[in-house]
């Protein structure tokens, strides 16, 4: 395997940002966010398209504002995400909630005008009791799923997400009981999905549209695979979108119903637009038959995906003063007292170590962890070993950097503890 190179930072920029903001620091490229957003807005859709950014991937308000300014709306997964987006200035009418757990202030949020997708039969009942007579969407489990790993597969019989596709009659009965009108069918089968499985799920979702005559919108969720490592491949949105667009046209010709399309990319929009600059704070080895370990000043407290999924992220060593010329095989580990805190697991197997060939790094050199825009700052073990969250910096389109999330003092972690 050859050594990975930097995606959007330069070695010089890495050193400058590290000395200005300290390490670890997430760096977001506005250019890359905009480029990806443009691509999603061109998703084939013969009867109209709404792109909703799945904010769970990375909910920083600076990102929400950039996407909202380009015409994207928002997919939220909890009442807290709804509140967070509204505080960032997103109008309630541009928010859609598909949640495993409904918020306590559900009625209030519905009155503000958010869209909602019920994800279980019981949720149809709860929405109906809160606000009978309104329009809703139904999230179905279409019967198959696909994810980059088993843990990111959220479709098929092994998944609790959505109403099982055989329960359309039961769903209709509940809609009738509360005088609700289903105007949207929603499916989402996983993150990092196989494009072929995604296209089959899209076909099954359109079959569900047939069963609900008031449906005007089909939401096919997110899951568009992104290549973080050089050897991986990304989903081509035009390729997966074309058969869907053809199917929507055929459906319109047959039924007279012109169905609006929604997609909810998270990963696709942000994964490769963020890199984390960290520092090698120690280097140890386990003898001639063992391994060389770089201990970073980050780890599962900022980037959990390797420990959780065996996910692979490019790891680029940048010398503190000058560019390294040698390479070596090393295991890169995080700063937590946890043997699972590793950045170089075997692909898909978080329990196995897989040494990575990297430019030889020394204590105080930097390691840039690439592809950390999605499910990293929003999904990590921040607080473990009392490490506080890391700051976030945006490099804007003119190339200048600004702080978009400050680094709090570690005391925020214990500030609410009650003393006798
Ligand atoms: C309902 C829904 N929509 C969209 C997404 C975004 O998925 P991805 O980040 O893979 O695009 C998710 C992710 O879990 C989801 O649950």
Image (spheres, helix red, strand yellow):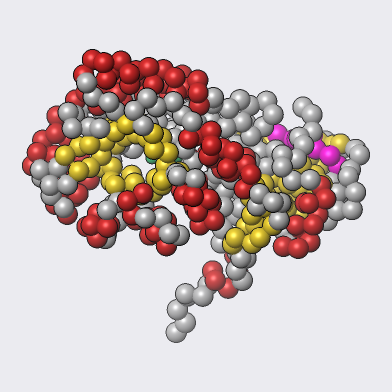
Where in the figure is residue 298, as x and y percent of width and height?
68, 54
Camera-nearest residue between 219 and 373? 219
Image quadrant of ligand 1?
top left
Instruction: Give the answer, above or below, for where 280 lies relative to 152.
Output: below
Q: Quadrant of the C terminus?
A: bottom left
Inspect the magenta stretch and tell me whether residue 159 lies in it.
no
> Residue 5's image quarter?
top right
Camera-nearest residue between 7 and 387? 7
Q: Is residue 118 visible?
A: yes
Residue at 58% across / 43% down in the picture? 33
Inspect the magenta stretch and tell me whether residue 359 lies in it.
yes
The magenta stretch is 354-360
Camera-nearest residue between 360 and 103? 103
With 93 as the anchor, is 236 left or right in this view? right
Instruction: Give the answer, above or below, for where 359 lies relative to 15.
Output: above
Q: Is residue 201 visible?
A: no
Where in the figure is residue 379, as x and y percent of width and height?
52, 50
> Residue 200's image quarter?
top left
Q: How many marks?
A: 0
Where in the figure is residue 410, as x and y percent of width and height?
60, 69
Residue at 36% across / 32% down in the picture? 48
With 154 as the anchor, is 402 left or right in this view? right
Residue at 33% across / 21% down in the picture? 248
With 75 as the anchor, is 413 left or right in this view? right
Q: Quadrant of the N terminus?
A: top right
Where in the figure is residue 408, as x and y percent of width and height?
60, 68
């Amino acid at each position: 395997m050859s050594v990975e190179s930097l995606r959007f930072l330069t070695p010089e920029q890495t050193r400058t940002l590290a000395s200005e903001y300290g390490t670890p620091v997430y760096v977001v490229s506005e250019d890359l966010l905009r480029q990806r957003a443009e691509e999603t807005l061109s998703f084939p859709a013969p009867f109209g398209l709404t792109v909703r950014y799945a904010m769970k991937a990375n909910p920083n308000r600076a990102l929400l504002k950039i996407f909202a300014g380009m015409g994207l709306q928002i997919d939220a997964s909890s009442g807290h995400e709804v509140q967070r987006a509204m505080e960032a200035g997103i109008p309630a009418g541009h928010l859609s909630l598909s949640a495993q757990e409904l918020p306590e202030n559900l009625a209030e949020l519905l009155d503000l005008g958010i869209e909602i997708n019920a994800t279980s039969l019981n949720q149809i009942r709860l929405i109906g009791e809160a606000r009978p007579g309104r329009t809703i969407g139904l999230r179905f489990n279409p019967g198959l799923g696909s994810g980059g790993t088993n843990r990111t597969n959220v479709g098929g019989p092994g998944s609790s997400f959505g109403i099982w596709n055989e329960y359309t009659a039961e769903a209709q009965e509940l809609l009738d009981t509360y005088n609700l009108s289903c105007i949207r069918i929603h499916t989402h089968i996983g993150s990092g999905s196989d494009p072929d499985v995604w296209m089959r799920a899209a076909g099954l979702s359109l079959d569900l549209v047939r069963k609900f005559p008031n449906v005007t919108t089909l939401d096919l969720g997110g899951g568009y695979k992104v290549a973080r490592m050089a050897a991986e491949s990304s989903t081509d949105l035009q390729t997966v979108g074309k058969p869907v667009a053809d199917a929507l046209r055929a459906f319109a010709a047959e039924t007279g119903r012109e169905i609006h399309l929604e997609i909810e990319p998270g990963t696709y929009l942000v994964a490769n637009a963020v890199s984390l600059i960290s520092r090698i704070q120690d280097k140890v080895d386990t003898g001639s038959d063992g391994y060389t370990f770089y201990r970073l000043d980050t780890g599962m407290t900022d980037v959990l995906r390797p420990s959780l999924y065996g996910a692979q992220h490019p790891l680029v060593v940048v010398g503190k003063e000058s560019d390294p010329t040698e390479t070596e095989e090393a295991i890169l580990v995080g700063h937590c007292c946890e043997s699972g805190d590793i950045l170089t697991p075997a692909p898909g197997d978080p329990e196995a170590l897989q040494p990575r060939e990297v430019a030889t790094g020394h204590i105080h050199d930097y390691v840039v962890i690439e592809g950390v825009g999605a499910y990293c700052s929003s999904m990590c073990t921040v607080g473990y070993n009392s490490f506080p969250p890391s700051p976030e910096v945006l490099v804007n389109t003119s190339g200048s950097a600004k702080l978009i999330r400050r680094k709090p003092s570690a005391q925020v972690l214990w500030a609410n503890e009650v003393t006798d």
